[in-house]
Amino acid sequence: MTFISVENLKTGYETEKGTVQAVDDVSFALENGESIGIAGESACGKSTLGLSIMRIVPDGNIASGDITLEGKSILKMSKSEFAKNVRWKDISMVFQGAMNSLDPVFTVEEQFIEVLKQHRYNGDYKQKISEIVNSVGLTQDVIKKYPHELSGGMKQRIVIAIALLLKPKFVIADEPTTALDVLVQAQIINLLKKLKKDGMSIMLITHDLAIISEVAEKIGIMYAGKMIEFGSAYEIYKNPKHPYTQALLKSIPRLRGDKVTNYIRGSPPSLIQPPQGCRFYDRCPHAMEKCKKDPPKFKTDSGYVSCWLYE
């Protein structure tokens, strides 16, 4: 059974210069228990995709498309129904820059209690908070502390714990290891792996393809608002098809073998007036005349690729 499905999703932001097409015709689906990693350059629409699923796009709006969770369309729900029955209960999010999202004037316990109150939790607050703090590998003494008394890794774990508080089925983690040292990054990755082992589905949004390989079975590669390739992690790492995916993987520094770091020449196009056809056209070493027309999604063994090379 399809667990979550995103179909032809379009999300934009209105600006003085026009509409920024941050997410443009994005589609993917996950089965029960599967997780996905979303990768791509900055401003390619990764975070907006996560915010669209949470239905909290600041200064923007979902123009078209659909998102279904276990067969139910969450975009057709009223805002109040979605907030009451889905957000934070079925789908939750660890926001980018999460370490700065804790309120400095309240203790960790008070911030947990606020979430439980807002969502009308009927159980024992203290027991629930104690259980969730243990589940992310923290000791009970952190509950009474203020955010400034915690290290960066501890704050990140608290934010993850808040996202897990109501036992959601699907967690969106937006750059959860950014600004953390390597040791703490490893701890957060191990935590995400543990959550996945316990049956939770995760959407991991990151620039780091190595982190995705640790957590997700599926990968979606985004470029200039489009999901240009989607499939199994094994297939995309072993045999990337889109020229952008190939270039992205070649740009990762290596410790062994060819140690020359490649880079992708040029810059992404404007999303206010994106070019017709393939948006990677100006930077692609395989560009052809037909690439000036929009490429359809060609099927691969485990997903699809949007590139005329596979016509």
Image (cartoon, helix red, strand yellow):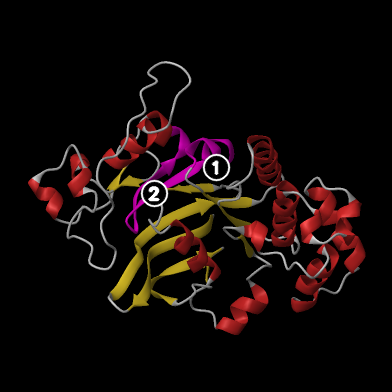
Which amino acid type is marked by label 1? Ala
In which quadrant is the C terminus drawn? top left
Disc 2/disc 1 C-alpha distance (Å): 19 Å
Instruction: Give the percent coordinates (x, y) of residue 168.
Output: 68, 61
Figure check: 198 above or below 80: above
Res. 7 mark: none
**From this viewpoint, is residue 234 visible?**
yes
Instruction: Give the percent coordinates (x, y) of residue 198.
Output: 72, 46
Instruction: Give the percent coordinates (x, y) of residue 60.
Output: 43, 75
Mark closer to the chain start, 2 or 1: 2
What residue is pinned by disc 2? 41
- Give the residue displayed 34% in from the left and 40% down from the top: 245
Question: Based on the displayed image, in which of its 4 quarters is residue 225 positioned?
Answer: bottom left
Q: Is residue 251 magenta?
A: no
- Give the residue displayed 40% in from the left and 36% down from the top: 236
Figure check: 8 above or below 205: below
**Residue 119 located left or right of residue 249:** right
- Give the residue displayed 33% in from the left and 31% down from the top: 262
Question: Based on the displayed image, in which of its 4 quarters is residue 78 positioned?
Answer: bottom right
**Residue 86 located left or right of residue 29:** right
**From this viewpoint, is residue 169 visible?**
no
Figure check: 73 above or below 236: below
Number of residues whose C-alpha sits closer than 10 Å to that of mark 2, classed few (under 14), some (14–19) or many (20 or more): some
In which quadrant is the N terminus drawn? bottom right
Number of residues whose C-alpha sits closer than 10 Å to that of mark 1, classed few (under 14), some (14–19) or many (20 or more): many
Q: Comparing marks 2 and 1, which lies closer to the viewer?
A: 2
- Give the residue displayed 27% in from the left and 39% down from the top: 243
What residue is pinned by disc 1? 216
Q: Magenta stretch?
A: 208-234
SS at badge 2: loop
Which amino acid type is marked by label 2? Glu
